[in-house]
Image (cartoon, grey):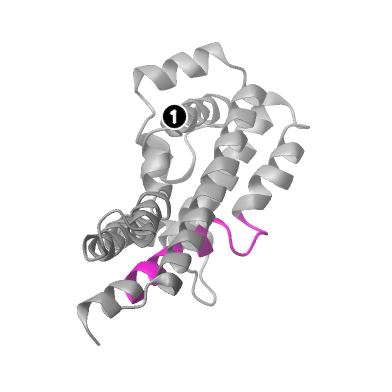
Amino acid sequence: MDSLAVAKVLGLTSSGIFAGTYFIPIRYTWALSHAAVPAILFAPEELQAKQWRYQYLMGFYVSCRTLEIGETRTNAGLMCLRHGKISRPMCIVNGLSFGYLAYHSPESSLIRTLYILAALTSASGVPYALTLLRRTNGALSRKANRFAGPGPKNGQIVALTYAFNEGRSIERDQRMGTAETVERWSWHNYIRTWVLVLGTMVGALAVALDGK
C-alpha cells in the first residue's frame, strides 16, 4: 500500500468519524436542533439555559469518545479532560490527508478541487465551534451559569469555559434573551452538520474519481 492509498484511507476514515459524531445517526446532533431545541423553548428561561447546557455537554462527551458499557456520562466527561478529545487530532489528520492527495493530483483538475474542498469542509466541526459558534456558546454558558449554577466540575469543563469571559460572549449574553440565543445556536448547529456531511461526500467522490 503506497502513501496515496494510506492518505485515502485516513482521509475517509477521519471524515467518517466527524460525520458519525455530528450527523450519523441522525438521532443525535441533527435531533438537537430539530427536536430538542423546540422542546427546550417551551420551558421557562431558567430551565431553558439549564437544558441547553445539558444537551450541549452530552454532545461534547460524545465527541470525545464512545461510552464504554456501564460508564456514566459524567465519567466520560472526566476522561475527556484527562485524555483529550479525538476531534482535534482527527481534524489535523483529515486536513493533512486530503491536502496530501490534493498536492499529488493534477493541477487545475476537478479531483484536486474536490480534495481541497473535502479538506476544508469535512474537518470543519472544531474550527466552526471555535469561531462562528464561539460567542453563542459563550453567551449560553454564561446564561446557564447565572440561572442554574456553575454546572459539572464547578463549571470548569472546557466546553463551558473557552469563550465564557470573552467580550463578544458577554455582549451577546446581555443583548439577546435565552430563547433567541438558543435558536441562534440551533441554526449554527444545522449549518455545521450539513457542512460536515458535505465534506465526507465530497471526499468520497474525489476518491472514487481518482484512478491512482
Looking at the picture, does residue 32 appear above or below residue 144? Answer: below
Query: Is 114 within the magenta?
Result: no
Describe the element under mark 1 as helix, strand or loop.
Answer: helix
Q: Which residue is pictured at 69% across the width and 39% down the height? A: 37
Q: How many marks?
A: 1
Magenta region, residue range? 9-28
Q: Which residue is mark 1?
A: 138
Label the magenta part by its dominant secondary structure.
Answer: helix
Residue 3 % position (x, y): 21, 78
Looking at the picture, does residue 45 appear above or below residue 10? Answer: above
Q: Which residue is farthest bottom?
A: 1
Residue 68 % position (x, y): 49, 75
Residue 24 % position (x, y): 59, 63
Q: Quadrant of residue 87?
A: bottom left
Query: Is 25 within the magenta?
Result: yes
Q: Quadrant of residue 88?
A: bottom left
Q: Is residue 74 visible?
A: no
Residue 158 % position (x, y): 36, 43
Q: Which residue is pictured at 58% across the width and 16% down the height? A: 176
How crowded pointer 1 is (Cα within 10 Å; few <14, some 14-19, many 20+) is rated as: many
Quadrant of the image for the N terminus? bottom left
- Asked whether 181 or 95 is in front, the reply is 95
Looking at the picture, does residue 50 appear above or below residue 66? Answer: above
Q: Is residue 211 visible?
A: yes
Check disc 1 and give the amino acid type. Gly
